[in-house]
Image (cartoon, rainbow, N blue to C red):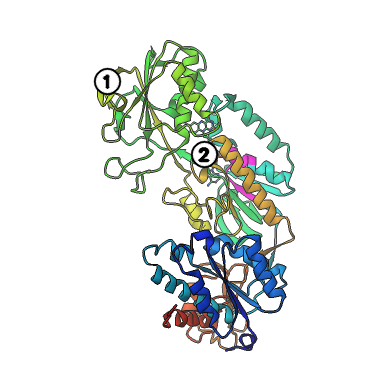
Amino acid sequence: MSGAMDEAKVGVYVCHCGGNISDVVDVKAVAAELGKHPQVAISKEFAFMCSDAGQKLVIEDIKSGKINRVVVAACSPALHELTFRKALQRADLNPYLYEHVNIREQVSWVHKGDHDAATRKATSLTRAGVEKILRQDRLESIHVGAAKRVLIVGGGPAGLKAALDSAARGLKVTLVEKSGRLGGHLHEFDTVYPGGQSASELLGKLLSAVSANPAITVVLGAEVKTWDGFVGNFKAVLSTGDAVNAGAVIMATGYRHTAPSAGEYRFGKDDRVITLPALIEQMKAAPRGPLTRGGRAVRSVAFIHCVGSRQIEGVHAPQEDGKVNDYCSRVCCTAALHTINALKERQSDLAIYDLYRDIRTYGRGHEAIYEQASKNGVLFFRFTEEAQPEIRESSVVVKDVLTWNQEVELPADLVVLVTGVKPGEVAELTAMMKLPTGSDRFLQEAHPKLRPVEVANNGFFLAGACQAPMDLVESAAAAGAAASKVAAVLSKDFITLDPYVARVDAEKCTGCEACLPECAYTGALFMNGSKKAEVNAALCKGCGACVAVCEPRALDLAGWSLDQMEAMVDAMASEVAP
Ligand SMILES: Cc1cc2nc3c(=O)[nH]c(=O)nc-3n(C[C@H](O)[C@H](O)[C@H](O)COP(=O)(O)OP(=O)(O)OC[C@H]3O[C@@H](n4cnc5c(N)ncnc54)[C@H](O)[C@@H]3O)c2cc1C
């Protein structure tokens, strides 16, 4: 037991989480059991530890000198670990003398059927937390310098908005766009929902604001080719040869249209069958007059929704990676209805049939577009995934759920497949930057509610449709949020990082180099001039891979040392009788 432990006085606080925990776990029994530990000076339970009143309990106990280390047994640390660290700081205690034990997600929510076992597990985990914090050093945060430049990858509407908002916050911006022009998919549209604004006017405004802004450097026809560094000091080499040193990165790589699979709804075999983006392109190229196909006037059009979205394994052909797109692409329903209304405006006698599984017009003003289509005389037919519409010589046949599966044959000079969206082609880039993606392959945020535009990797942020199917309003909101998050990170002269990184006891290091090949983070671990392992704390992610192979135990993880882990395991393995 270290000298620090002799004087350690731990405060344990068990949270009811308003019944979320206490309906299952006997929180009084947990607090009473922990109170028996010789180095636990205070053990309490409280309704909501995260509330002001809960935090005040901790602060007052620290300030009165009764405790100098804190364990809160409550929800997931992802939610409130930081809340309590800040509370310790407000009480002038080192914020890392704090341990957050998760007895909600890991106990009460998963052991609802066995209250006694749940109480034993909560006691055991909290006791492990006490043993861990007793062996905790007074760690200090790591400070690294911050380059006041943000690298934005992708120059679509989201990238453009993120660039303008970042520049408005005093940051320099490098905007990298892989195609030869800025604007992304906005180029494809004539007018955009919900307001029917001209897409070219909207794009024109964004482009002129970007080109007039001296803080924004645009690099066209470029991709990130090599990647290095850490938050505050990323280094990218572009395919153009330019090198960018940026403190943070906003990913704005957008989406791609899904293509129907070969033969799906006779696509590629019947030239009456086209996709929604192809129809939009045709309408943009010839904005007035009746619609034609192959030189002939079109008098009837059938739209079929959910092509390439909400796919079902075993029913639909998989995408290139062998997986189906089982998610809803969200934007395509409103995009189709907006296009339908535009068609009706130019050709009121056009017969339009809308064949859907479900319709999702979720945004502000989108439902009005649906209603307008109805008023415009569009006929809606609902089908199920088991009975998909059939394309015939000059018609479409659908089993209509709304009329108890009556088979209806509809004339169709043109069939429009309302295709979905999938993420941009970024697999190589995300592998290089080690960015997480979801099961839908879109880039993954750290937490959908608490950190919606941040990536778990420090210094990375998300804007627009690279994260999920989004319309322009949502993409702009995400871009604005990402820019303000970047500004918060880069506003100071240095960035503060958690100290949970590998550290080396030079006396124990034999210089065997077994640790080097285990390190996945370039530059984080190296041999110094004295042939001893050395850690670059800014690059180390604290994964512990090097610790696991270090036979002389020269390497350890600050805040998660082997001693701490052994003590936690012992505590959990010991008999607990609440
Ligand atoms: C058929 C259809 C119609 C739509 N109509 C509307 C509408 O009317 N109203 C509306 O609000 N929304 C509409 N949307 C949604 C709209 O298109 C998106 O909200 C918007 O394009 C998202 O912008 P973004 O910048 O995130 O992505 P994108 O527009 O996809 O732009 C991404 C940019 O990143 C670039 N890029 C990709 N990878 C890299 C890389 N590795 N390096 C550098 N650059 C890269 C791309 O070249 C592109 O320029 C529609 C969507 C569809 C499918």
Residue 566: give x, y in percent of width and height: 48, 82
Rendered residue at 74%/60% (across/down): 493
The quarter of the image holding the N terminus is bottom right
Q: Which mark is residue 408?
A: 1
Q: Could you tell whether 247 is left or right of 345 in the image?
A: right
Residue 223 horizontal/vertical position (percent): 55, 48
Nearest to N terminus: mark 1 or mark 2: 1
Amino acid of disc 2: Met
- Rendered location of residue 29, percent (x, y): 48, 74
Identity, as a three-letter code, of the amino acid under mark 1:
Val
Dividing the picture into quadrants, the one containing residue 384 is top left
* Circle 2 residue: 470
Q: Is mark 2 within 8 Å of ligand 1?
A: yes
The correct choice, above or below, for 138 with respect to 492 in the image is below
Which residue occupies the foreground of this view, 61 or 346? 61
In this orientation, does residue 470 appear?
Answer: yes
Q: Judge the density around disc 1: few (<14), some (14-19), many (≥20) Cα neighbours within 10 Å.
A: some
| Residues drawn in magenta | 151-161
Q: Whole-percent x and y of residue 381?
A: 34, 24
Q: Which class describes the residues within 10 Å of circle 2: few (<14), some (14-19), or many (20+)?
A: many
